[in-house]
Image (spheres, helix red, strand yellow):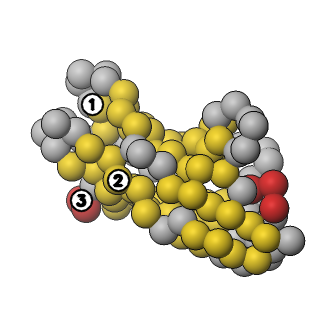
């Protein structure tokens, strides 16, 4: 059973930083793509960033220059470094992973990030 577990969320003031982690377990194939999504209050879930197996990354324009996605394939752990946080970054952040070979998609349970003004 593949599981993704996010951690690192919390309450931070505007301009602060947080680092989210996504730890994966249970996959024997590894993952092609790992991404972060978020869902703010009353909003649709939106894509934030992703990293492809060979290390290529991409981030949404709304967070470009402030958020950085990275990963440690050996540890099956991925990170979202969030700097210069703004109140509009307040959301539940979810980790998403697409498994090699099977193509199955998995989601974590989410971690809450709240940015106070």
The answer to whether mark 1 and mark 2 are in CB contact below 8 A is no
| Image mark for residue 5 | 2
Question: Which residue is denoted by mark 3 in the rendering?
Answer: 74
To which residue does mark 1 refer? 100
Rendered view: 106 above or below 89: above
Choose the circle earlier in sequence order: 2 or 3. Answer: 2
Within 10 Å of disc 3 (Cα), the crowding (few <14, some 14-19, many 20+) is: few
Separation of disc 2 and disc 3 at Cα?
16 Å
Quadrant that contains the N terminus: top left
List x then y, in percent, for residue 55: 45, 49
Q: Residue at x 66, y 51 (%)?
A: 91
Which of disc 2 and disc 1 is earlier in sequence? 2
The answer, for residue 34, to whether it is visible in the render is no
Marks 2/3 in contact by CB < 8 Å: the verdict is no
Quarter location, residue 31: top left
Please name which of the two marks, 1 or 2, marks the residue nearer to the observer: 2
Residue sitting farthest toward the front: 42
Instruction: Pick whichever, 97 or 55, lies toward us.
Output: 97
Identify the residue at image location x=48%, y=49%: 110
Q: Earlier in the sequence, mark 3 or mark 1?
A: 3
Judge from the rendering whether residue 24 lies leftward or rightward of residue 66; answer left or right.
left
Q: Residues within 10 Å of mark 2 (few under 14, many from 20)?
A: some
Can residue 114 be seen here?
Answer: yes
């Amino acid at each position: 059973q593949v599981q993704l577990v996010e951690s690192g969320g919390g309450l931070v003031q505007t301009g602060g930083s947080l680092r989210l982690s996504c730890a994966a377990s249970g996959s024997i194939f590894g993952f092609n793509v790992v991404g972060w999504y978020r869902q703010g209050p009353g909003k649709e879930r939106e894509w934030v960033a992703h990293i492809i197996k060979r290390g290529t990354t991409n981030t949404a324009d709304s967070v470009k220059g402030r958020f950085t996605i990275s990963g440690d394939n050996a540890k099956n752990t991925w990170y979202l470094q969030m700097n210069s946080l703004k109140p509009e970054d307040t959301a539940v952040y979810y980790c998403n992973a697409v498994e090699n070979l099977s193509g199955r998609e998995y989601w974590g349970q989410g971690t809450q990030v709240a940015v106070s003004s």
